[in-house]
Amino acid sequence: MTQIRRVFMFGALLLVVACGGGGQPTTAPTSQPTGIPTDAATPATEAPASAAPTATSGASLDPSQSDAGIVAQATISNDTRGERDGTYTIIGTAADASDCAFTFEGDQYIAVAWDTTAPDGQIRRLGVSVAADDIPAEDGEVVAGINDGGASLDFTSPSGIGTTYGGNATRDNEGSSEVTVTRVGAGLIFDFTGVTWDNVNFAGQLVCAEG
């Protein structure tokens, strides 16, 4: 009887070991713990900003905001004279003679947005001038690479010193600019980039509802 009991207990012990009962696992778990993503996305890194701004062709400037049908925007960077780095918008007013038209002589086209009520630190004037021959006549026509015209802007300031930023390569010591003119129906879009005589970068866009 005792021998039968020993055989039974030994058989039960073999069954427990074979099933892994009471033993430690011999290998580490292969699955990841819950709550820890295995394919987390790598954070995106922003491209370094350029020192010089670029033209803003296609910007959503709405000339209907202006009673003169003229709106403009400009971005300044690398400004060591007045610390005016940033983007500014001007809505031209008819009372201040904002206009888009050929000159009396007919050899130039001048588009200018004026707002003499602009507060201190904001743009009170932004203008672009190109040769009359550079104004496209057909809807959708683009004239690019104009570097014999000019673009400039003025800030409102109590001192009035160092508030003009512009570029015109046809004049001595007045920096340079490049303009692109696009005809959109009856209107004109002027995209420009430039650098002042003291190496301040600027760029922007002026939109005329009619021109």
Image (tube, rainbow, N blue to C red):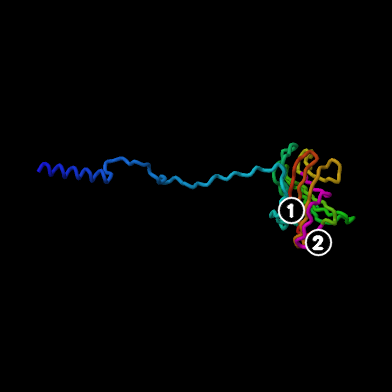
Location of residue 167 by image quarter: top right
Tell me if 52 is positioned left or right of 101 in this view.
Answer: left
Percent position of residue 15, x then y: 23, 46
Dot 1 crowding, Cα within 10 Å, few <14, some 14–19, many 20+: many
The residue carrying mark 2 is: 137
**Residue closest to the far right:** 105
Percent position of residue 91, x then y: 73, 52
The residue carrying mark 1 is: 71
* Residue 206 or residue 142, whichever sits in front: 142
Q: What is the three-letter code of the residue carrying label 1? A: Val
Dot 2 crowding, Cα within 10 Å, few <14, some 14–19, many 20+: some
**Residue closest to the far left:** 1
The numbered mark at residue 37 is none
* SS for dot 2: loop
* Residue 7 or residue 101, whichever sits in front: 7
> Could you tell me how many numbered marks the image carries?
2
Tell me if 206 is positioned left or right of 19 in this view.
Answer: right
| Quadrant location, the C terminus | bottom right
Percent position of residue 143, x then y: 79, 56
* Residue 181 or residue 27, whichever sits in front: 27
- The magenta-colored residue range is 135-154
Q: What is the three-letter code of the residue carrying label 2? A: Ala
Tell me if 25 is positioned left or right of 180 in this view.
Answer: left
Is 184 part of what is drawn in magenta?
A: no
